[in-house]
Amino acid sequence: MDASVPPSAPEPVVDIRGLSSVFTTPEKRFVVHENLDLAVWPGEVLSIVGGSGTGKTVLLRQMLGLEQPARGKISVLGQPVSEIGKAGAASRIGMLFQHGALFSAFSVLENIAFPLRELKTLPAALVREAAMVKLQMVGLKPEDADKMPSDLSGGMIKRAALARALVMDPPLLLLDEPTAGLDPESSDGFVTLLRSLHRDLALTVVMVTHDLDTLFELSTRIAVLADRRVIVTGPPKEVIAFQHPFIHDFFLGERGQRAMELLREYPFAV
Ligand SMILES: Nc1ncnc2c1ncn2[C@@H]1O[C@H](COP(=O)(O)OP(=O)(O)OP(=O)(O)O)[C@@H](O)[C@H]1O
């Protein structure tokens, strides 16, 4: 029982029940998830951790409707993902992909505006204005608008991709390894930005990360994927205390000292 879930909990933002995911190649049939359950509650930053290949990215893609599970149900904001459709998903769910490259032939502003332009219902001036608001919201400058992706640093690319994910004001944001590939300073800046956007926009966030600093600085709850399902969910301190070989290795092995320092540093996450 996860004590961090309120007893009179509201509707979950994401509700996953009995999920099974299977990939078949000519050589083998590979079961990634089996009877997996997970609920994400409004306003939380839920981080999913798990070993390599445990299906964290697949789970995010299934929440977006980009992949269909073999069995089980996934609802987002009360509606089955299979019924939401591409346009519906874009307005409800923002996704920052791990290798979320920008379109190299488009300027920063054109990249940010892309989901709005795709709607083909809004006047160009309004689209530009909305994209400029998001560009500045992620800490880019107006003069960055006409730059091309090849002119940007890694941190600026992440910020532009985040602005694009948020351009339709989705209530739910999915982040796949948001700080991967960033130097420590850019990573700290990006985490600070994510924390303030989570608060200011009242977002619900689901994040996959291997980075302990990112994990402890942002997560209100952690879900651990192992043995093809979610073996435990809860605030960081509770999850660390759960007996499982993956948790021991991930938090209490070589990285354990750092994990304990971070727990002291970010007591709000406990
Ligand atoms: N389209 C696909 N076809 C076949 N196998 C796939 C497909 N997509 C994912 N897989 C397999 O499913 C497993 C889970 O992949 P996924 O990328 O979700 O893992 P992950 O937990 O995010 O791993 P990592 O931490 O290494 O990024 C992997 O073994 C992967 O090879």
Image (spheres, helix red, strand yellow):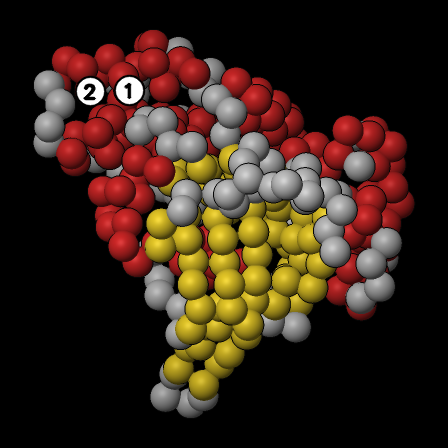
Decide: few, some or many residues near mark 1? Use Cα within 10 Å; few <14, some 14-19, many ≥20: many
Image position of 111 (left or right of 187): left
Residue 184 in view of the camera: yes
Image position of 37 (left or right of 107): right
Amino acid type at circle 2 is: Val
Asked if the residue at tag 1 contacts the one at tag 2, i.e. Cβ–Cβ closer than 8 Å, the answer is yes
Q: Quadrant of the C terminus?
A: top right
| Residue assigned mark 2 | 127
* Ligand 1 within 8 angstroms of badge 1 C-beta: no
Pick whichever, 260 or 197, lies toward us: 197
Residue lying at 41% horizontally and 43% vertically, measured from the top left: 77
Q: Residues under labels 2 and 1: Cα distance? A: 6 Å
**From this viewpoint, which residue is outermost toward the top?**
142
Q: Secondary structure at mark 1?
A: helix
Amino acid type at circle 1 is: Ala
Image position of 54 (left or right of 233): left
| Residue assigned mark 1 | 131
Residue 226: % across, % down: 66, 67
